[in-house]
Image: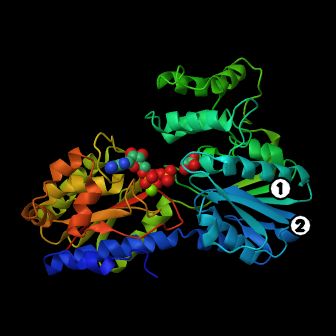
Amino acid sequence: MSYIKNLEDLTMNGPTQKDKNARRSILLSFDKAIASVDPYKSVSSRISDNSIFQMNKSIELSDFEEIFVIGAGKASGMMAKAVEDKIERISEGWVNVPAKTEKLVDLSKIRLNPAGHPIPDEGSINGAREMLRILSKADEKDLVIVLISGGGSALMEYPMEGITLEDLREMNRLLVLSGADIREINTVRKHVSRVKGGRLAEAAYPARVVSLIISDVIGDPLDTIASGPTAPDETTFQDAWEVLRNYSLVERMPQSIIKVIKDGVEGRIPETPKPGDPIFENVTNMIVANNLKAVQAAEGVLRSLGYSTLVLGSRVQGEARHIGKMLAGLASSIRNEGIPLSPPAALLMGGETTVTVTGKGVGGRNQELVLGAVRQVAGLDGVAIASIGTDGIDGTSEAAGAICDGHTLERALSEGLKPEEYLKNNDSYSFFSWLGDAIITGPTLTNVMDLMGVVVED
Ligand SMILES: Nc1ncnc2c1ncn2[C@@H]1O[C@H](COP(=O)(O)OP(=O)(O)OP(=O)(O)O)[C@@H](O)[C@H]1O
Ligand SMILES: O=C(O)[C@H](O)CO
Ligand SMILES: [Mg+2]
């Protein structure tokens, strides 16, 4: 099954045969990459009829009296389906997923509960409360499987005493728009929550906990992914206070949030559980899919197609349009000097760029990255540059990303489309959908950030 619905059209959009070949190759590699981080397969491959496999050891399911399943995230519904298909003896399960996606998966033992994303809603709180109810009855003879994926912070939330849902929603809105990065945002979230920053593991103790995690954060930091519900938290109330101060949020933050963080700083609320806390002796946190796995799957495809391929890691950050321009420069260097590789060659990387949105247009960081490359790559034959969000939704658009080649600029100008105008208005989706170069997948139900690549034909 191809995730990229318009792969053939995107390929045929290349004016020369070399452009077509380059386009097809990069798109095939992205398709395989998304398949490699499919949430169902990523979980199912870790479970046999009686064990959950970690690297060099396994957790025997027969050791436990009862098995419970909880969790939250955009991919957690399909993860739950894999658990239910593999494990007979599930006593009870409750997993929060984005509203409407609960209908996409048919489960009989695990309850998929619609919740709010990117801002928490009533469902986020009701679901978290049910998970805490389940944990209150799990004891040392039982196993709790926790299914965690991107979006989990908003989808599963149970705030500290005195914080209303309205306050929580306002806090998330202010944080997401503040310019703080996800580690800073989740530092605050962890310190006003009863289920984040290792507190879900605290609630599960003394039951055995195995968390299966799909990472949507650069470097896969366990205490940041979905705000680390079962991971030791390295951040403190003081850190949370500093985030509010650094982004001038103190005056605008609801008073109930300020009060909790101040109480924590002054020691009136216990800190989140830290590394070394005995509760984590019962906890295994397992990354079952991440950006690096996807990038390496794409690398395998390009190598099998005969391209010498260089992977530039899975931790790329920076303003999207600048990264696009840099990729175009690398494509030009491969085409003209054979540096860092001689053609046929490919470069791949993963991560999460950012966009400073000032315009009123429609787009996303992947489409904006490719738009940033269009002028710089103009004139090069047999070159394709593409970027895709692995969750299938790039920003405010319906596209997952975009693709361009050395003739995209002349095609655009002949249609009266100037890249700089569309960059200025953050309107990358309009630009690429007009040219038929927007990559369409629909929601992929996984989320391991973005993939970017360059292919240069012989
Ligand atoms: N018109 C636009 N053009 C380019 N980028 C945009 C535009 N509008 C929003 N963005 C960027 O898109 C980002 C959100 O995109 P998106 O929802 O794909 O991210 P995400 O990582 O998939 O989020 P999540 O994992 O929470 O779903 C915003 O942080 C913003 O910077
Ligand atoms: O939910 C969250 O906190 C983000 O998706 C990072 O995992
Ligand atoms: Mg997205």
Residue 179 placement (x, y as % from top left) = 43, 35
Disc 2 residue crowd, few under 14, some 14–19, many 20+, Cα 10 Å: few
- Please name the amino acid that badge 1 sits on: Arg
Which sits in the foreground, 146 or 401? 401
Q: Amino acid at mark 2?
A: Asp
Q: Is residue 12 rendered to the left or right of residue 396?
A: left
To which quarter of the image does residue 430 belong?
Answer: bottom left
State the SS at label 1: strand
Q: Establish if 237 lies above or below 220.
A: above
Left or right of 401 in this view: 41: right
Return the residue nearer the eye: 253 or 64: 253
Residue at (60, 56) in percent of width and height: 149
The answer to whether one can see residue 222 in this image is no
Does 290 appear above or below 200?
below
Q: Which residue is mark 2?
A: 63
Image: 380 above or below 190: below
Cβ–Cβ under 8 Å for marks 1 and 2 = yes
**Crowdedness of circle 1 by 10 Å Cα count: few (<14), some, many (20+)?**
many
Q: Earlier in the sequence, mark 1 or mark 2?
A: 2
Q: Give the image location of residue 154, x and y in percent.
A: 60, 47
Helix, strand or loop at disc 2? helix
> Label for residue 208?
1
| Residue 425 visible here | yes
State which quarter of the image contains the C terminus.
Answer: bottom left
x and y, in percent, of residue 368 in the image: 29, 53
Measure the alpha-carbon separation of dots 1 and 2.
10 Å
